[in-house]
Image (cartoon, rainbow, N blue to C red):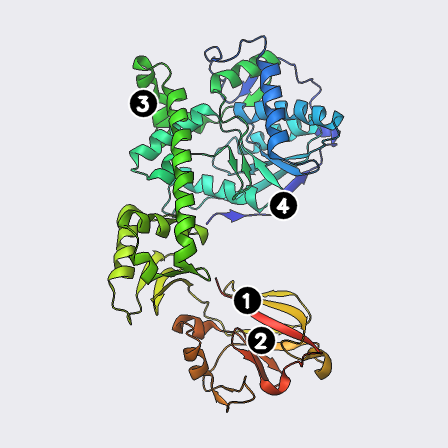
Amino acid sequence: MATLTRARVVDSTVAALVQKSTPTQSTTSINPPVKKLQSPVKYSAMDVVVNLTQHVEAFLKASTAPGQTLLLAFSGGIDSCVLLDILVFARDALAKQSLDINLQAMHVHHGLSPNADAWAEFCTSICARHHIPLHIVHVAIPSDSGLGIEAAARQARYAALLDYPSDYVLLAHHEDDQAETLLLQLLRGAGVKGLSAMAQCDDGRRLLRPLLNVSHAELAAYAKKRKLQWIDDESNQDTRFDRNFCRHYVIPVLEQRFPAAKATLARSAGHIAEAAALLDELAQLDAAHCVQDQHLNIESLAKLSMARARNLLRWWLSSHQQALPSTQRLQEMLSQLLGAKSDAMIKVAIDSARGVWLRRYKNLAYIELNKPDTTLAMVWQGEAELYLPDQSRLLFDKQIGAGLAIERLGINKLRISSRIGGERFKPDVAKPTRTLKHLLQEANIPPWQRERLPLVYCDDTLAVVPNIGVASHLQANERELGLVISWICE
């Protein structure tokens, strides 16, 4: 993973960083000059500014709500400079309609180019000129991530943007980017989800792409008409990167025979996105019968056709924020789940580097996260939620007539500890004290979850075993205020 340092927030009112120029100064690019591009496809130079501004304004009205914070990913390149300029117009137009938006920007400083510091200062001056707060985040790109520089930088950029507390992140991806993405995904043998390329509105990740159906030629025409400045990243010419190779060599050849190749590829990505959405809807229908408390029922899964079973497994993994596996890996997971004996506890790697595993226990499939090698020792002092070192959570909910009788017992803090073995517990007044091991087995809690289970103590007394019960002599009666403690481990 890339390392993020604290964001440097640049106050847009710092006049010292503002160049003494207007947004209509001569067209220029920094390091090296931007090549002249062909005329726009859809709009003439006379109406491109008006049309694109109206397009983005309508998009924001349909996709956002007044008062929301919108964070622009601002590289300083021609695409993001055009989007920033359009957003300034749209912001002012929406404000006149009492539909104000809180527009901010972020520049991710990768440090990969000797010009990186100059680019950050350029972005600072542009944002200051338009009174847009700019957040500069420095990231370190590891050379040994296994992703390659291009993918690692992209991953770091998205991590920084999504880590900032905004309602939506605005990206300047356009129609040409969509075509290149589809082509690259085809060459990688991606499935329907990958071939659907980029979504214009990605609510799951809070991403918006207002220019996704606009060509790069149109953006260039806008920049020329408005006489904008921008920077040109020299790495965009490096054809060692797959995307640049397709952009400079593959697509130009396609366009010689098929002039509308980029628009056609982008349109196909939209059709595939619709198909992907339908597959997700089918998976949700199947999940209604096959998913129990977020776990996958193997018996129900086996009743589906193999195509539907694979589709459901993909959807289920995605719903747990896991990267989609390759076709071969997915088939291996499905074979293990469906082919193992009923009492077998399988363990298949989902992401071995992060310690994420697919497990099966008593006809249910689980996702297991490796627990840290630390002994749990925490104190609850009234919080509604506690995050444990393994990223599981304890929830504390006060209710009448349920849980731990904190009011009667005068409890204002509790000790959270790991299991050490040999614990005995009596959650039912009508039954004898039993070993915790037997209670957990009886509750069908998988062995790997038993090892991670947090125990809640009142002084030295085991008071609560989350998801099992409360010690019988400490339970709230029907009129008392009690504390219900739940453990969320996935």
Kind of residue sitting beneath label 3? Val
Residue matched to label 4 = 165
Q: Which residue is mark 2?
A: 416
Q: CA distance from mark 3 to mark 4?
A: 39 Å
| Viewer-side residue, 31 vs 263 | 263
Task: Tell me the kind of residue under disc 2.
Answer: Ile
Question: For mark 3, does the 10 Å Cα neighbourhood hold few (<14), some (14 to 19), or many (20 or more) residues?
Answer: some
Q: CA distance from mark 4 to mark 1?
A: 23 Å
- Front-lying residue, 47 or 108: 47
Count of number-bearing discs: 4
Q: For marks 2 and 3, give the one nearer the viewer.
A: 2
Quadrant hosting residue 437: bottom left
Q: CA distance from mark 2 to mark 3?
A: 59 Å
Q: Choose the circle earlier in sequence order: 2 or 4.
A: 4
What amino acid type should be assigned to the residue bearing mark 4? Pro
Quadrant in which residue 411 is drawn: bottom right
Residue under label 3: 250
Image position, residue 202 (x, y; %): 51, 38
Whether tag 2 and tag 3 are in contact, CB under 8 A, the answer is no
* The disc label shown at residue 388, or none: 1
Seen in the picture, residue 294 relative to 183 is either above or below; the reply is below
